[in-house]
Each structure stands twice: as structure tokens, then as C-alpha cells.
Amino acid sequence: MRDPVRVVGGALTAGVVALAVALVVIWALAAAHGQPGPGAPVLAGHLAAAAVAVALQRVADRRADRTGTLAAIAVLLLVAVLVGVYWWN
């Protein structure tokens, strides 16, 4: 049985990557139509968070020891910070 923290971390990582891709698409569509879209700081923050989350989740998936568990917990914290900074401000 897999550690629930790692499973949740994987799901959140997938969600952050999907959100980052969606924001890039929204930005491109807005730019194509001359509309304001998400700004550069929002795009950069989400893309950076997605990259870090993927790296942390790779560690969590490959290490069965404490390091893997801490990496999964770090994904949870990263997503909490991302939501707090960009979505609940």
C-alpha cells in the first residue's frame, strides 16, 4: 500500500502542472485577442511551482525512505503557498 501523503502529493503535482498549462493557454489566447490575461509574475510563479512540484514528486516516488516522505510533504506545502499567494489574496 502506498503512503497516502505521496498519493496526495502526486495528485496535487498533476493539478499544479495542469493549472500552469491552462494559464499559458489562457495567456496566449488573451494576447492573440488583445485582452489582458494573467501577467508575467503569475505565469512565472505557476510555472516555477509546477517545475519544483514535479522535481519533488519524482523524489517522493523514487525514495521509500524518510527523504521521499519529506519530499511529498514539501509538495503539499508548495501547493498551499501557491494557493495562498496567487488565489487567496
Image (cartoon, grey):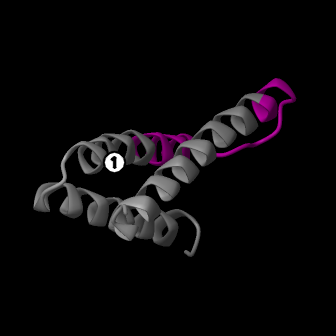
- Indicate yes or no whether the magenta region holds residue 42: yes
Is residue 13 within the magenta segment? Answer: no
Residue at 12% across, 62% down? 66
Q: Is residue 28 left or right of residue 66?
A: right
Side (left or right) of 83 relative to 19: left
Q: Residue 34 lies in what quarter of the image? A: top right
Residue 31 location, x and y as percent? 76, 29
Can you give x and y, in whole percent of width and height, for residue 42 in the image? 54, 49
Q: Which residue is outermost to the front?
A: 1
Q: Nearer the viewer, residue 66 or 33?
A: 66
Query: In the rendered image of this protein, does residue 50 appear above or below residue 80?
Result: above
Q: Residue at x 47, y 51 (%)?
A: 13
The extreme left residue here reads: 66
Residue 82: image location, x then y, percent: 45, 62
The residue at the point 22 percent across, 62 percent down is: 69
At label 1, the amino acid type is Gln
In terms of image quadrants, where is residue 29?
top right
Against 25, is 79 above or below? Answer: below
Q: Which residue is mark 1?
A: 57
Looking at this rendering, what residue extends furthest in the top direction? 32
Magenta-colored span: 29-48
The location of residue 40, given as percent across then percent down, is: 54, 40
